Amino acid sequence: MIKEITTEQLNPSQKLQYDLWLPKFRYNIWGLPFEPYIDYQGEDKNILSWQSKEAYIKWWGQPPGNEPYRDDGFYTRELTWLSEWCQPSIVIEIGTDKGMGTFLLDRLNSPAEIYTIDTAEHAYMPPDKQVEIGFFSRLNQCQVYYVKEKPDVRPNFIFIDGDHSENAVWEDSLWAWNHIDKTRRWVIVWHDFRQDGKHDGLLRAVNRFSDYSRRKIYKFIDSSTVWTTGENE
């Protein structure tokens, strides 16, 4: 089942990291190199935020439902506090695209070994500029492995944000469950869990995974990023 919770329902160790997510995010971004991207002249605020480190922190360092943007797709908060709680040694990202999530995971988990998976050769910058997969993380020389197939490793943090079709999300979720290292703290995260009529397949797959694994999957009311965690199982 998918359980919508408040922050007060987090366990104490997770609540502590949730309360500190914003200063942790700012510290991790501010304290490491940042290569800006200034060539974009469009209106996409996610891409405009890459014009400077200050702009990036201001844009991404806000809660998912923060006015006036109301974008529940912002995953910064959840990836930050879950990374701080988990302290992963191996991170897997399924779905590299332009490398925005890749960059964030790298900056949040500097000591970790990070793999980002995408079968495509290129991503697209609006309106139709073709760029290399992982554009922003490559621009910033993130120390990650870019791969086309799931590696033979035992991660303890997995971020699923690839193909959003029902079959693909189910297969990615099942792979995550079979490979996650449950001997220590572990996290599986899904992006775009939206009841908007456009993500019904993803919703069915995540609910199916919850039933299969017998794990509750949690979300906050203002976010489309959902997660499940465990510890020393």
Image: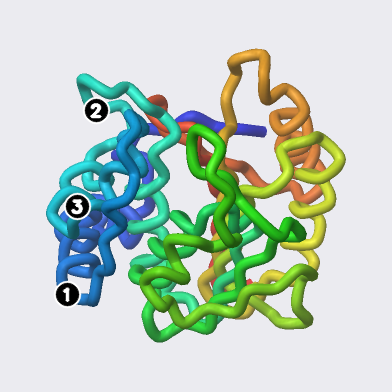
For the residue labelled by badge 2, is the local secondary structure a helix, a strand or a loop?
A: loop
Q: Does residue 165 appear anywhere in the picture?
A: yes
CB within 8 Å, label 1 to label 3: no
Residue 110: x and y in percent read 37, 80
Q: Is residue 22 left or right of residue 210?
A: left
Q: Is residue 162 above or below residue 64?
A: below
In terms of sequence position, does the residue under pointer 2 or pointer 3 come before the other?
A: 3
Answer above or below: position of 150 versus 167: below
Q: What's under tag 1, amino acid-wise?
A: Gly
Q: How many marks?
A: 3
Mark 3 burial class by Cα count in 10 Å: few <14, some 14-19, many 20+: some
Looking at the picture, which amino acid does disc 3 mark? Answer: Ile
**Labels 1, 2: front one:** 1
Read off the residue under disc 2: 66
State which tag comes first along the sequence, 1 or 3. 1
Is 53 in front, or is 173?
53
Does residue 125 sit above or below 200 in this rendering? below
Amino acid type for the residue under numbered disc 2: Asn
What is the x, y in percent for residue 21? 24, 55
Nearer to us in this view, 39 or 95: 39
Spatial CA distance of label 1 from label 3 is: 12 Å
Q: Find disc 3 in the rendering and name its residue.
A: 57
Distance from Cα at disc 2 to Cα at disc 3: 14 Å
Camera-nearest label, 2 or 3: 3
Q: Which residue is mark 1?
A: 31
User: Residue 225: image x %, image y %?
Assistant: 49, 40
For the point 35% across and 68% down, the residue is: 108
Give the secondary structure at mark 3. helix
